[in-house]
Amino acid sequence: MSKTPEVLFVCVHNAGRSQMAAAFLQHYALGRVAVRSAGSEPAERVNPAAAEALAELGLDITAEVPTKLSHADVEAADVVITMGCGDTCPVFPGKRYLDWALDDPAGRDVDAVRPIRDDIDRRVRTLLAELLDPPRQRHGS
């Protein structure tokens, strides 16, 4: 990709999984990736257990506000990562879509959210490595 890659994380409420993923990617990418998150049915506020789980690692999402998913968000993204939003996420040709099957942290305490957080952390690190060092095309000899 010649321009800064744009990643959109989407989950139903944009209060837990997608917020955690966006926070991790912003932290690790150091400005090399544009990051957004949104939800098909945004909650009123960020999930407190997700915020607490991230705070344990020095990341703060308490000021984030869940946002409604728009066609413009999807259209602007190079990579769209869905996390349980199902059919409510619009599909545009030419976009890379990934579906991360992750447990929903809604209604869970921080002890139950930590494994979800850690899974998201691993996936985000892998994604970032792919975005910043894509596999090179091999030319036959």
Image (cartoon, helix red, strand yellow):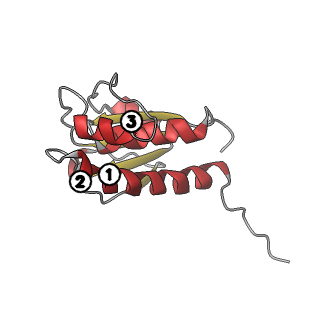
Above or below, 34 relative to 83? above
Q: Can you tell which quarter of the image residue 59 is in?
A: top left
Please tell me the numbered disc located at residue 21.
none
Marker count (numbered): 3
Judging by the rendered image, the residue that carries numbered circle 1 is: 114
Q: Decide: few, some or many residues near mark 2? Use Cα within 10 Å; few <14, some 14-19, many ≥20.
A: some
Most distant residue in the right direction: 141
Confirm or deny contact between disc 2 and disc 3 (CB under 8 A): no
Look at label 2 and name its amino acid.
Ala
Q: Amino acid at mark 1?
A: Arg
Whole-number angstrom distance, CA of label 3 to CA of label 1? 11 Å
Residue 85 % position (x, y): 24, 48
Which residue is at a point 51% across and 35% down the rendered structure image?
26
Amino acid type, label 3: Ala
Asked whether the viewer can see residue 46, the reply is yes
Q: Earlier in the sequence, mark 2 or mark 3?
A: 3
| Residue 71 versus residue 89 in the image, above or below | above
Q: Which residue is mark 2?
A: 112
Tell me the residue at 33%/33% (across/down). 71
Q: CA distance from mark 2 to mark 3?
A: 15 Å
- Pick the quarter of the image with the C terminus: bottom right
Q: Element at badge 3?
A: helix
In the rendered view of the protein, which quadrant contains the N terminus? Answer: top right
- CA gap between label 1 and label 2 equals 6 Å
Residue 138 in the image, given as x and y percentages of width and height:
75, 69
Do labels 1 and 2 touch, CB within 8 Å? yes
Give the residue at mark 3.
Answer: 55
Give the structural element (helix, strand or loop) at label 1: helix
